Image: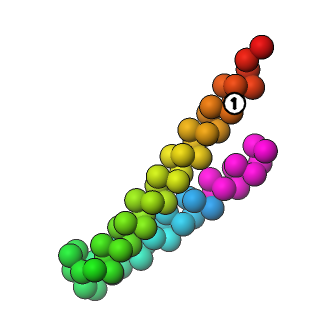
Amino acid sequence: MVMNSVLKQEACMNKIEELRNKMVSAAGQYGMSHPIVLRYSQELDRAHNKMILLEVTNTTNWQNSLSF
């Protein structure tokens, strides 16, 4: 289970980096307020939220495994 969550976190981190690069590139080409830049920003927010949720879930699972 730990390995699976690590893979999910790694996939999220890769997606975050990919979206960040796309957003920066689009902002340079079209400007900060272009709809595609805003879309990438929203997707990036969702990816960050998913990453945080995975981290919280993993921390909770780890803490629960220490309970007697």
Would residue 2 be counted in the magenta stretch?
A: yes
Q: Which amino acid type is marked by label 1?
A: Trp
Q: At x 40% / y 59%, what residue is drawn? A: 45
Is residue 11 among the parts visible in the rendering?
yes
Q: Quadrant of residue 67?
A: top right
Would residue 24 be counted in the magenta stretch?
A: no
67 up-or-down from 50: above or below:
above
Scheme of image coloration:
rainbow
Q: At x 75% / y 43%, what residue is drawn? A: 2
Q: Which residues are magenta?
A: 1-10
The quadrant of the picture occupied by the C terminus is: top right
Residue on which the image places disc 1: 62
59 up-or-down from 43: above or below:
above
Q: Can you name the residue that lies furthest to the bottom here?
A: 29
Q: In front here: 25 or 3?
A: 3
Q: Main secondary structure of the magenta part?
A: helix
